[in-house]
Image (cartoon, rainbow, N blue to C red):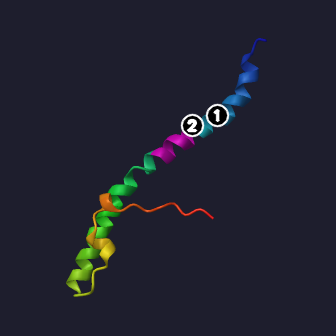
Amino acid sequence: MELSLSQLQPLSFVIGPMVVATVLFSRQLPKGGKKSQENRVLLRQLLENFDLEIPDELNESDENIVRPIKTN
């Protein structure tokens, strides 16, 4: 069974956009961790400046927090 160029063209219209979407999506994922830590630090500073109570979640480091996955 031989594939000609005309048979591969429709397949490339499907696979091409999927590859592009995967690359774009994967570039967005790693940025979340650092931004989350920066947001926590900023929130903690704001709470301290307004003399408000700081929740226990902000006193813990991210490495020590293990959140179980809830399944229903």
Residue 64 screen position, x and y as percent: 31, 60
Residue 65 screen position, x and y as percent: 35, 62
Is residue 69 toward the left or the right of residue 18 in the image? left
Q: Which residue is mark 1?
A: 15
Q: Secondary structure at mark 1?
A: helix
Q: Report crowding for label 1: few under 14, some 14 to 19, many 20 or more residues within 10 A (C-alpha).
A: few
Q: Residue at x 71, y 23 (%)?
A: 8
Residue 72 screen position, x and y as percent: 63, 65
User: Magenta residues?
Assistant: 19-26
Which is nearer the eye, 27 or 41? 41
Which is nearer the eye, 40 or 67? 67
Q: Secondary structure at mark 2?
A: helix
Q: Which residue is mark 2?
A: 19
Q: Are marks 1 and 2 in contact (CB under 8 Å)?
A: yes
Magenta stretch mostly in which secondary structure? helix
Picture layout, residue 30 above or below residue 60: above
Q: Report crowding for label 2: few under 14, some 14 to 19, many 20 or more residues within 10 A (C-alpha).
A: few
Q: Inspect the image, locate mark 2, and give the three-letter code of the amino acid beneath it.
A: Val
Q: Inspect the image, locate mark 1, and give the three-letter code of the amino acid beneath it.
A: Ile
Q: Residue at x 61, y 34 (%)?
A: 16
Residue 60 screen position, x and y as percent: 28, 68
Furthest residue in direction top, as rendered: 2
Residue 34: image quadrant is: bottom left
Quote the CA–CA distance across marks 1 and 2.
Answer: 6 Å
Q: Quadrant of the N terminus?
A: top right
Q: Residue at x 55, y 39 (%)?
A: 20
Residue 11: image quadrant is: top right
Picture layout, residue 21 above or below residue 42: above
